[in-house]
Image: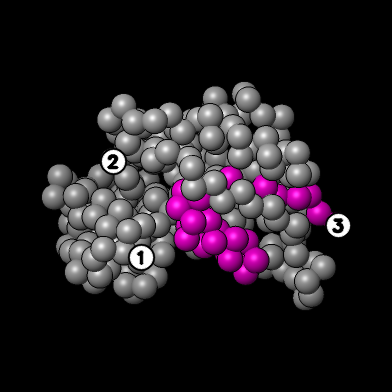
Amino acid sequence: MYKTLGVIGGMGPEATCDLMRKIISLTAASCDQEHIHMIADVNTAIPDRTAAILHGGADPLPELVRSGRRLEAAGADVLVMPCNTAHYYHAALSEALDTPVLHMPRLTAAELRRAGVRRAAVLATDGTIQSGVYAGAFADEGVEPVYPDADGQAAVMRLIYDGVKARRVELRDVPVRPVLDGLRERGAEVCVLACTELPIAFEALGLADGCLDPTRVLALAAVRACGAPAAVDSPW
């Protein structure tokens, strides 16, 4: 009935499942057959994106391309990546594939503009921030980014890597609420959860109010790109 969606996943596995859950919840469907056909390649062999961008780690692009080609061969008409940092490789990945890959940071920036947001905090990995993935997308839409200070960024990274990915620490033990307060004091109208692990953590911590979830933005765009009716008009 609709186009088939391919999910380049595994970055990380829980974030992949979170995207797929959101796609299901944002589809206006009354039975199984009215949902989108999704194919996921949960490729946990894709090297860490931040390590590659900032520290000379293994290049993720070859595995991203392998996943994309597997999904194309399986019949995907539209591709998505539930990883913000991976969009640093979006142009090269798109060149290597025949199937369009939705761009989560650009979609998120466009949503901020539609909502009239002029200044937004970006909570993300070091790789996402220093690569300029969101800075470029925001500039195109006239949105000014606000970033955490060094201590705040360390707390965000700890929440992502030690809290959600590794589960080495309790989420509540990472001091992120002061980070949010500080960003809002500096004029951020909205906090963008620009790492796909962060919506998972923020929902668990009860901190999602006043935040925009790019995973949800991408999910809604994926529903529309596949031609299915959306259950809501906005990702907010």
Q: Which residue reaches farthest left?
A: 151
Q: Dots 1 and 3: beta carbons under 8 Å?
A: no
Q: What residue is pinned by disc 2?
A: 126
Residue 12 coordinates in the image, percent (x, y):
45, 53
* Front residue of this view, candidates 75 and 232: 75
Q: Check disc 1 and give the amino acid type.
A: Ala
Which stretch appears magenta?
A: 1-26
Q: Check disc 3 and give the amino acid type.
A: Met
- Secondary element at tag 1: helix
Label 2, residues with CA under 10 Å away: few <14, some 14-19, many ≥20 = some
- Secondary element at tag 2: helix
Q: Check disc 2 and give the amino acid type.
A: Asp
Q: CA distance from mark 1 to mark 3?
A: 35 Å
Please indicate, yes or no, whether residue 206 appears anywhere in the rendered image.
Answer: yes
Q: CA distance from mark 2 to mark 3?
A: 41 Å
Q: Dots 2 and 3: beta carbons under 8 Å?
A: no
* Front residue of this view, candidates 156 and 65: 65
- Secondary element at tag 3: loop
Label 3, residues with CA under 10 Å away: few <14, some 14-19, many ≥20 = few
The residue drawn where x is 46% and y is 33% is 60
Residue 144: quarter of image: top left
Q: What residue is pinned by disc 3?
A: 1
Residue 185 is covered by the magenta coloring: no
Q: Which residue reaches farthest right?
A: 1
* Front residue of this view, candidates 74 and 216: 74
The residue drawn where x is 27% and y is 68% is 171
Q: Is residue 172 left or right of residue 4?
A: left
In the rendering, which numbered label is found on residue 201? 1
Which of pointers 2 and 1 lies earlier in the amino acid sequence?
A: 2
